Protein backbone atom coordinates (compact mmCIF):
# COMPACT_ATOMS: atom_id res chain seq x y z
CA UNK A 1 0.00 0.00 0.00
CA UNK A 2 1.35 3.42 -0.97
CA UNK A 3 1.70 5.95 1.80
CA UNK A 4 3.52 9.22 2.23
CA UNK A 5 6.78 9.07 4.11
CA UNK A 6 6.34 10.34 7.66
CA UNK A 7 8.71 12.72 9.37
CA UNK A 8 10.27 9.87 11.33
CA UNK A 9 10.83 7.86 8.16
CA UNK A 10 13.18 10.59 6.96
CA UNK A 11 15.46 9.90 9.90
CA UNK A 12 17.56 7.25 8.17
CA UNK A 13 19.94 4.90 9.93
CA UNK A 14 23.57 6.00 9.75
CA UNK A 15 24.62 4.03 6.70
CA UNK A 16 26.05 4.61 3.27
CA UNK A 17 23.19 6.86 2.27
CA UNK A 18 22.54 10.37 3.68
CA UNK A 19 22.47 9.65 7.37
CA UNK A 20 23.43 12.92 9.00
CA UNK A 21 21.00 15.81 9.12
CA UNK A 22 21.36 17.84 5.93
CA UNK A 23 19.13 20.74 6.89
CA UNK A 24 22.12 22.98 7.61
CA UNK A 25 24.20 21.71 4.69
CA UNK A 26 24.12 22.25 0.95
CA UNK A 27 22.08 19.47 -0.65
CA UNK A 28 24.36 16.77 -2.05
CA UNK A 29 23.77 14.49 -4.98
CA UNK A 30 25.51 13.01 -8.00
CA UNK A 31 25.44 15.92 -10.44
CA UNK A 32 28.46 18.03 -11.39
CA UNK A 33 27.61 20.82 -8.97
CA UNK A 34 26.76 18.63 -5.96
CA UNK A 35 28.39 15.27 -6.72
CA UNK A 36 31.17 13.25 -5.06
CA UNK A 37 33.96 15.48 -6.37
CA UNK A 38 32.63 18.47 -4.44
CA UNK A 39 31.07 16.86 -1.34
CA UNK A 40 34.03 18.03 0.71
CA UNK A 41 33.28 21.62 -0.28
CA UNK A 42 29.60 21.37 0.67
CA UNK A 43 30.23 20.99 4.38
CA UNK A 44 31.11 17.27 4.45
CA UNK A 45 34.81 17.65 5.18
CA UNK A 46 35.49 13.97 5.91
CA UNK A 47 34.59 13.14 2.30
CA UNK A 48 37.61 15.23 1.29
CA UNK A 49 40.19 14.65 4.03
CA UNK A 50 39.32 11.15 5.25
CA UNK A 51 42.08 8.55 4.84
CA UNK A 52 39.96 5.36 4.94
CA UNK A 53 37.22 6.23 2.49
CA UNK A 54 34.93 3.90 0.55
CA UNK A 55 34.37 2.48 -1.99
CA UNK A 56 37.64 0.94 -3.18
CA UNK A 57 39.06 -0.99 -6.10
CA UNK A 58 40.02 -4.39 -4.68
CA UNK A 59 43.12 -5.92 -6.24
CA UNK A 60 42.77 -9.64 -5.51
CA UNK A 61 46.48 -10.50 -5.67
CA UNK A 62 47.25 -7.96 -2.94
CA UNK A 63 44.68 -9.28 -0.45
CA UNK A 64 45.89 -11.20 2.61
CA UNK A 65 44.36 -14.65 3.07
CA UNK A 66 42.50 -15.26 6.32
CA UNK A 67 39.95 -17.73 7.64
CA UNK A 68 36.29 -17.12 6.95
CA UNK A 69 34.68 -15.47 9.99
CA UNK A 70 31.37 -14.47 8.41
CA UNK A 71 28.07 -16.06 9.38
CA UNK A 72 24.95 -14.72 7.68
CA UNK A 73 21.57 -15.45 9.27
CA UNK A 74 18.94 -13.51 7.33
CA UNK A 75 15.25 -14.40 7.43
CA UNK A 76 12.05 -13.32 5.65
CA UNK A 77 10.15 -10.34 7.03
CA UNK A 78 8.18 -7.34 5.91
CA UNK A 79 10.06 -4.36 4.48
CA UNK A 80 9.34 -0.71 3.78
CA UNK A 81 10.63 0.35 0.36
CA UNK A 82 11.46 4.04 -0.03
CA UNK A 83 12.85 6.34 -2.68
CA UNK A 84 14.83 8.79 -0.56
CA UNK A 85 16.15 10.85 -3.46
CA UNK A 86 19.57 9.20 -3.50
CA UNK A 87 18.77 5.49 -3.72
CA UNK A 88 16.05 2.87 -3.40
CA UNK A 89 16.15 1.50 0.14
CA UNK A 90 14.35 -1.36 1.88
CA UNK A 91 14.08 -0.90 5.66
CA UNK A 92 13.63 -3.96 7.85
CA UNK A 93 12.17 -4.52 11.31
CA UNK A 94 13.53 -8.01 11.92
CA UNK A 95 15.36 -9.68 9.04
CA UNK A 96 18.17 -11.30 10.98
CA UNK A 97 21.83 -10.50 11.42
CA UNK A 98 25.41 -11.36 10.60
CA UNK A 99 28.26 -12.32 12.87
CA UNK A 100 31.66 -11.12 11.66
CA UNK A 101 34.87 -11.83 13.55
CA UNK A 102 32.84 -12.70 16.64
CA UNK A 103 30.70 -9.55 16.66
CA UNK A 104 26.94 -9.60 15.94
CA UNK A 105 25.42 -6.96 13.67
CA UNK A 106 21.66 -6.58 13.10
CA UNK A 107 20.46 -6.06 9.52
CA UNK A 108 18.84 -2.63 9.29
CA UNK A 109 18.37 -1.97 5.59
CA UNK A 110 19.56 -2.66 2.07
CA UNK A 111 19.94 -0.16 -0.76
CA UNK A 112 21.34 -0.04 -4.29
CA UNK A 113 23.83 1.72 -6.53
CA UNK A 114 23.96 1.80 -10.32
CA UNK A 115 26.66 1.22 -11.41
CA UNK A 116 28.64 -0.49 -8.65
CA UNK A 117 30.76 1.56 -6.28
CA UNK A 118 33.30 -1.08 -5.28
CA UNK A 119 35.33 -2.65 -8.07
CA UNK A 120 37.20 -5.96 -8.36
CA UNK A 121 40.52 -5.74 -10.21
CA UNK A 122 39.33 -2.57 -11.89
CA UNK A 123 36.03 -4.05 -13.04
CA UNK A 124 32.85 -2.04 -12.53
CA UNK A 125 29.53 -3.93 -12.25
CA UNK A 126 26.11 -2.67 -13.37
CA UNK A 127 24.52 -2.96 -9.91
CA UNK A 128 25.62 -3.20 -6.28
CA UNK A 129 23.54 -3.88 -3.17
CA UNK A 130 24.63 -2.71 0.27
CA UNK A 131 23.27 -4.56 3.31
CA UNK A 132 23.71 -2.24 6.26
CA UNK A 133 24.07 -3.61 9.79
CA UNK A 134 24.60 -2.13 13.25
CA UNK A 135 25.68 -3.46 16.62
CA UNK A 136 23.96 -2.49 19.85
CA UNK A 137 26.76 0.03 20.47
CA UNK A 138 26.40 1.62 17.03
CA UNK A 139 29.24 0.00 15.06
CA UNK A 140 28.41 -0.35 11.36
CA UNK A 141 29.07 -3.21 8.95
CA UNK A 142 28.18 -3.02 5.26
CA UNK A 143 27.92 -6.27 3.31
CA UNK A 144 28.22 -5.60 -0.43
CA UNK A 145 26.96 -7.79 -3.27
CA UNK A 146 27.93 -7.12 -6.87
CA UNK A 147 25.51 -8.02 -9.67
CA UNK A 148 26.29 -9.12 -13.20
CA UNK A 149 23.73 -8.93 -16.02
CA UNK A 150 22.16 -12.36 -16.42
CA UNK A 151 19.23 -14.31 -15.08
CA UNK A 152 16.57 -12.36 -13.22
CA UNK A 153 16.67 -12.51 -9.43
CA UNK A 154 13.10 -13.16 -8.31
CA UNK A 155 13.55 -11.54 -4.90
CA UNK A 156 15.02 -8.43 -6.51
CA UNK A 157 11.91 -8.38 -8.69
CA UNK A 158 9.87 -7.47 -5.61
CA UNK A 159 11.93 -4.28 -5.41
CA UNK A 160 12.55 -3.46 -9.07
CA UNK A 161 8.85 -3.72 -9.98
CA UNK A 162 7.61 -1.82 -6.91
CA UNK A 163 10.33 0.86 -6.92
CA UNK A 164 8.71 4.18 -5.94
CA UNK A 165 9.35 6.72 -8.68
CA UNK A 166 8.52 9.71 -6.49
CA UNK A 167 10.80 10.84 -3.66
CA UNK A 168 9.23 10.36 -0.24
CA UNK A 169 6.88 7.53 -1.15
CA UNK A 170 6.95 4.32 0.89
CA UNK A 171 5.67 0.95 -0.28
CA UNK A 172 5.19 -2.02 2.05
CA UNK A 173 6.57 -5.37 0.89
CA UNK A 174 5.44 -8.54 2.64
CA UNK A 175 7.54 -11.68 3.04
CA UNK A 176 10.78 -10.29 1.67
CA UNK A 177 13.84 -12.52 2.10
CA UNK A 178 17.16 -10.62 1.84
CA UNK A 179 19.06 -13.91 1.86
CA UNK A 180 17.84 -14.56 -1.69
CA UNK A 181 19.72 -11.50 -2.92
CA UNK A 182 23.01 -13.11 -1.89
CA UNK A 183 25.16 -15.54 -3.88
CA UNK A 184 25.33 -19.06 -2.45
CA UNK A 185 29.04 -18.81 -1.63
CA UNK A 186 30.09 -16.39 1.09
CA UNK A 187 33.79 -15.93 0.49
CA UNK A 188 34.68 -12.27 0.90
CA UNK A 189 37.07 -9.35 0.84
CA UNK A 190 37.10 -7.32 4.06
CA UNK A 191 38.53 -3.90 4.86
CA UNK A 192 37.92 -0.86 7.04
CA UNK A 193 36.23 1.99 5.22
CA UNK A 194 33.54 4.63 5.40
CA UNK A 195 30.01 5.49 4.37
CA UNK A 196 30.05 6.06 0.61
CA UNK A 197 27.85 9.15 0.85
CA UNK A 198 27.90 12.26 3.04
CA UNK A 199 28.91 12.57 5.77
CA UNK A 200 31.43 9.85 4.70
CA UNK A 201 31.87 8.71 8.32
CA UNK A 202 34.82 6.35 8.77
CA UNK A 203 35.39 3.26 10.95
CA UNK A 204 32.86 1.25 8.94
CA UNK A 205 33.55 -2.48 8.49
CA UNK A 206 33.18 -3.53 4.85
CA UNK A 207 32.63 -7.08 3.62
CA UNK A 208 32.42 -7.46 -0.17
CA UNK A 209 31.32 -10.93 -1.25
CA UNK A 210 33.66 -12.50 -3.81
CA UNK A 211 30.91 -14.24 -5.78
CA UNK A 212 28.45 -12.18 -7.77
CA UNK A 213 24.68 -12.43 -8.10
CA UNK A 214 22.80 -11.88 -11.34
CA UNK A 215 20.02 -9.48 -12.25
CA UNK A 216 18.25 -9.12 -15.55
CA UNK A 217 18.83 -6.16 -17.81
CA UNK A 218 15.25 -5.06 -17.15
CA UNK A 219 15.66 -5.23 -13.35
CA UNK A 220 18.81 -3.14 -13.51
CA UNK A 221 17.18 -0.68 -15.93
CA UNK A 222 14.13 -0.28 -13.64
CA UNK A 223 16.37 0.68 -10.72
CA UNK A 224 18.62 2.91 -12.82
CA UNK A 225 15.61 4.74 -14.27
CA UNK A 226 14.79 5.98 -10.77
CA UNK A 227 18.24 6.25 -9.15
CA UNK A 228 20.25 7.31 -12.24
CA UNK A 229 24.03 7.07 -11.76
CA UNK A 230 24.47 7.12 -7.98
CA UNK A 231 27.96 5.69 -7.48
CA UNK A 232 30.99 7.31 -5.90
CA UNK A 233 34.29 6.50 -7.58
CA UNK A 234 36.81 4.22 -5.78
CA UNK A 235 38.93 6.01 -3.19
CA UNK A 236 42.63 5.66 -2.39
CA UNK A 237 43.33 2.54 -0.36
CA UNK A 238 46.33 4.18 1.32
CA UNK A 239 47.88 1.73 3.80
CA UNK A 240 44.74 -0.30 4.47
CA UNK A 241 44.89 -4.10 4.52
CA UNK A 242 42.34 -6.01 2.47
CA UNK A 243 41.69 -9.51 3.78
CA UNK A 244 40.31 -12.34 1.65
CA UNK A 245 38.52 -15.48 2.83
CA UNK A 246 37.08 -18.40 0.91
Image: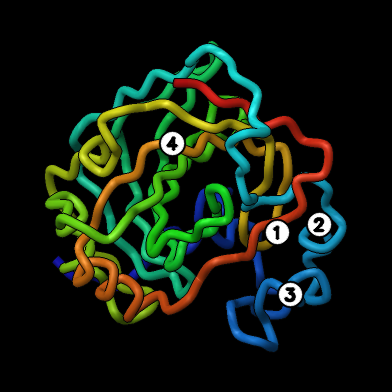
Label 1 neighbourhood size at 10 Å, few (<14), some (14-19), many (20+)? many
**Could you say which is closer to the camera, residue 80 or residue 17?**
17
Q: Relative to 57, say whether 140 is above or below.
A: above
| CA distance separating discs 1 and 4 | 25 Å
| CA distance separating discs 2 and 3 | 12 Å
Whole-percent x and y of residue 19?
59, 57
**Could you say which is closer to the camera, residue 80 or residue 191?**
191
| CA distance separating discs 2 and 1 | 7 Å
Of callouts 2 and 3, the N-terminal one: 3
The residue wearing badge 3 is 37
Contact (CB < 8 A) between labels 2 and 1? yes
Whole-percent x and y of residue 5?
35, 68
| CA distance separating discs 3 and 4 | 27 Å
Mark 3 element type: helix
Q: Which mark is residue 209?
A: 4
Q: Which mark is residue 46?
A: 2
Of callouts 2 and 1, the N-terminal one: 2
Label 2 neighbourhood size at 10 Å, few (<14), some (14-19), many (20+)? some
Amino acid sequence: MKRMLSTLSFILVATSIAYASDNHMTHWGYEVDNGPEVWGNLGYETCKIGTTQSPVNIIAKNAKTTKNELNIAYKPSSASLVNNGHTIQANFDDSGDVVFEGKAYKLIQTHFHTPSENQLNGKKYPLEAHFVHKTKDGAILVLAVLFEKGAANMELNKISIATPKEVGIVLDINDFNPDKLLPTKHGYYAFTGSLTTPPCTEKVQWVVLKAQQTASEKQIANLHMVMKDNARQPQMLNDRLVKVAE
